[in-house]
């Protein structure tokens, strides 16, 4: 097995016994399946069950895989209305397992990948689950940043201008071959960047169905997962990113994000994009959202840039997910879906 998939269990147990109150080994570490860019392990120890999130080994892009930021934001949100796992310890000593990592509680719930929620047999239940995702997103964007100690968690200025520059740079650094549609999309985004409206909130950065965990009854979200891309940003970025999933193609592949492209959500009890956005606006006390096409297209671009980064790691041999090499094939179709939104205007 590769270094990505395994941990030195004896060394890790000895370290955690010294650093985490109540932790007791021995332990076994089992890597979770799925597409985490930060490899994630279930830790079964004599003292209980935990989850470990680590940076992948090897050379990393600047600011990528920031598990220390994940740890900080999870700790900051522990007493808010945003459901998160309890964190126990951040290890910045790369000599312990080969990269930085943190330990958190194991939350026992349900994670879903398909936007159609085929596992759910009730339209009313699907409607409640989407409303719960909407509620939690609004709660996230309503967090008092200063009160939780995150006022310096992001940079000031136009969030989308900053993010567009960042992800364009990340994309170029990961580019394996030119993709004309991505170049065209980047140009359109640069030309249609909205003026800064001054809105600032805590932004998850990857808020989507498979990054929230529902309780066993699928009524309440018990944990929002994968905070690697979180920052102080613009609330509409999270909203558009989640709505983007509804515009993606359906997929039968296991542990793969699957959308509702070409599917009427209403007969499934799932809100339309317009209904979902309207409910969010109601919760946030706003009337409407201008420049919606830009926010959607930016979401497609950023996911394309992330996918290109995964493909680059696969090419370099240090990707977390065994299917990472296939992720690069998503980049062009994602850009094409964004360009289709532009053509609809």
Image (cartoon, helix red, strand yellow):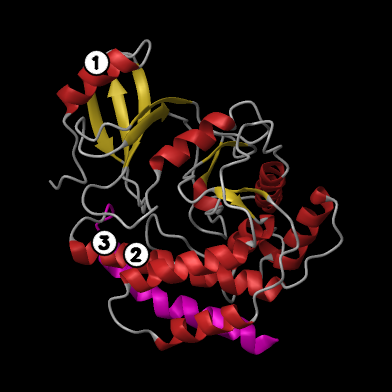
Mark before the other along the chain sequence, 1 or 3? 1
Mark 1 to mark 3: distance in Å?
33 Å
| Residue 249 visible, this angle | no
Q: Residue at x 35, y 55 (%)?
A: 62
133 w.r.t. 293: above or below: above
Q: Residues within 10 Å of mark 1 (few under 14, many from 20)?
A: some
Q: Main secondary structure of the magenta part?
A: helix
Q: Is residue 216 magenta?
A: no
Question: What mark, if any, has residue 25 been given in the picture?
Answer: 1
Q: Is residue 162 left or right of residue 307?
A: right
Secondary structure beneath label 1: loop
Check whether the beta carbons of the residues at disc 2 and disc 3 lie within 8 A of each other.
Answer: yes
Mark 2 to mark 3: distance in Å?
6 Å
Secondary structure beneath label 3: helix
338 w.r.t. 228: above or below: below
Mark before the other along the chain sequence, 2 or 1? 1
Q: How many marks?
A: 3
Q: Residue at x 50, y 87 (%)?
A: 184
What range of the chain is rendered magenta? 320-345
Which residue is label 2 attached to?
309
Q: Residue at x 58, y 78 (%)?
A: 189
Question: What mark, if any, has residue 313 been given in the picture?
Answer: 3
Mark 2 to mark 1: distance in Å?
36 Å
Secondary structure beneath label 2: helix
Residue 34 placement (x, y as % from top left):
35, 51
Residue 67 placement (x, y as % from top left):
39, 41
């Amino acid at each position: 097995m590769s270094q990505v998939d395994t941990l030195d269990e004896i060394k890790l147990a000895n370290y955690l016994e010294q650093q985490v109150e109540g932790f007791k080994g021995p332990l076994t570490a089992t890597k979770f399946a799925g597409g985490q860019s930060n490899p994630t392990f279930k830790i079964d120890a004599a003292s209980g069950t935990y989850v470990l999130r680590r940076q992948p080994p090897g050379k990393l892009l600047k600011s990528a895989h920031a598990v220390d930021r994940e740890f900080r934001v999870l700790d900051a949100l522990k007493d808010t209305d945003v459901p998160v796992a309890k964190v126990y310890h951040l290890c910045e000593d790369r000599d312990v397992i080969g990269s930085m990592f943190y330990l958190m509680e194991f939350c026992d719930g349900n994670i879903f990948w398909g936007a159609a929620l085929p596992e759910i047999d009730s339209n009313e239940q699907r409607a409640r689950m989407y409303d719960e995702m909407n509620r939690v997103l609004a709660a996230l964007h309503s967090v008092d940043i200063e009160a939780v100690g995150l006022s310096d968690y992001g940079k000031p200025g136009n969030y989308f201008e900053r993010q567009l520059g960042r992800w364009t740079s990340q994309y170029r650094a990961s580019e394996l071959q030119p993709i004309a549609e991505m170049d065209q999309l980047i140009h359109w985004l640069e030309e249609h960047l909205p003026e800064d409206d001054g809105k600032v909130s805590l932004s998850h950065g990857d808020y989507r169905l498979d990054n929230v965990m529902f309780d066993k009854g699928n009524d309440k979200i018990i944990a929002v997962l994968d905070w690697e891309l979180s920052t102080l940003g613009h609330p509409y970025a999270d909203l558009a990113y989640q709505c983007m999933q509804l515009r993606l193609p359906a997929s039968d592949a296991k542990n793969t994000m699957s959308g509702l492209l070409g599917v009427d959500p209403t007969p499934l009890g799932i809100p339309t994009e317009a209904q979902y956005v309207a409910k969010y606006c109601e919760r946030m006390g706003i009337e409407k959202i201008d420049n919606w096409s830009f926010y959607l297209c930016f979401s497609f671009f950023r996911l394309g840039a992330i996918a290109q980064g995964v493909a680059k790691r696969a090419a370099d041999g240090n990707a977390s997910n065994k299917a990472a090499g296939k992720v690069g094939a998503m980049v062009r179709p994602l850009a094409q879906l964004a360009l289709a939104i532009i053509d609809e205007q």
